[in-house]
Image (cartoon, rainbow, N blue to C red):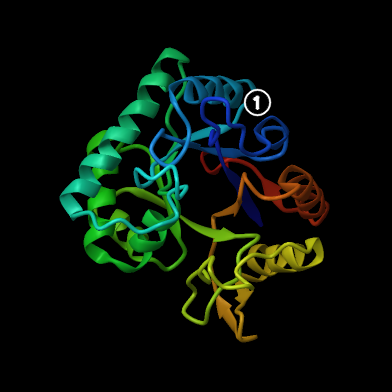
Amino acid sequence: MRIDLNADVGESFGNYIIGEDDALFKVITSANIACGFHAGDFTVINKTIQAAKENHLSIGAHPGYPDKQGFGRRNLNMSSTEVYEMVVYQIGALQAFCHIHHVSLSHVKPHGALYNRSAEDEEIANAIAKAVLDTAPNAILFGLCNSELLKAGASLGLKTAGEAFADRKYDDKGRLVGRGQSDALLTDFKEIMEQVENIVMKNQVVTRSGKMIDINADTLCFHGDGNNVAEIVQKTRKILEAKNVKVAPLERI
């Protein structure tokens, strides 16, 4: 058994500090770095890549809608061409900073509303996958397990990774329960750990209706802006490793 532990980081900007990046970097294996559209800025990107390198993490681009006020969690009515260009632009920004720090861009994972739309919308999924192919063809495309995004990436010959969530509730279709719902987020560590163990060790997840569905995850996400997230990841990793689960970035597994 093996799993990659990722978190969305680099989401501060200007004088606004978001998340527990420094503590998270000690316990995760892959960093999804905001590209300046939904969060982050050029200074934060630079510092975050440098810190991720120092902690030997896999570095990924985390492109989202241009919506800092909504933190990229609101749908924008953008065409597939606009989405393609937007993702190309954001990947390019991360690649430039990776270049000056002499590190590789290991993966790409869409953020928030763009991520959820790519799970269902074939046209948007294809636009994102094409953007990755044209800019970072050796990168791994992260997408929700059993999503249109993973299908689009595979059809273009990209390396893909099915992603599951430690702290989000699922519906019976294997999609994430919308954040507007009261039970969308798991906050109790016991519930989070139970979901993690089901995903990693049984390849299953319990939905909000109590149904058990199959899920085959390569990487597990923890939200970088969650409460006490670094402590939660630390405890989770310790329990998984005690159960002989190999925790490492995907390219090292």
Image quarter of residue 120: bottom left
Q: Is residue 142 above or below residue 59?
A: below
Q: Look at the image and tell me in which quarter the N terminus lies.
A: bottom right
In the rendered image, the vertical position of residue 237 relative to residue 74, given as above or below: above
Q: Residue at x 47, y 47 (%)?
A: 71
Residue 166 image offset from top left, x and y in percent: 65, 60
Q: Looking at the picture, does residue 22 appear above or below residue 192?
A: above
Q: Position of residue 195 (x, y in %)?
A: 69, 68
Label 1 belongs to which residue?
55
* Side of 214 relative to 68 (left or right): right
Q: Is residue 182 rendered to the left or right of residue 84?
A: right
- 68, above or below 142, in the image: above
* Residue at point 66%, 71% (across, down): 202
Which of 49/204 is in front? 49
Residue at image location 21% in from the left, 41% down from the top: 85
Q: Between 37 and 91, which is closer to the camera in this rendering?
A: 37
**Badge 1 density bin: few <14, some 14–19, many ≥20, Cα 10 Å:** some
> Considering the numbered disc 1 on the image, is that residue within a helix, a strand or a loop?
loop
In the drawing, does residue 205 fall left or right of residue 161?
right
| Residue that lies at the very extreme toward the top in this rendered image | 100
Identify residue type, mark 1: Asn
Residue 182 lies in what quarter of the image?
A: bottom right
Q: Quadrant of the C terminus?
A: top right
The reply to whether residue 33 is in sight is yes
Q: Residue at x 22, y 38 (%)?
A: 134
Q: Is residue 59 left or right of residue 20?
A: left
Q: Is residue 155 visible?
A: no
Position in image of residue 187 (x %, y %): 73, 62
Q: How many marks?
A: 1
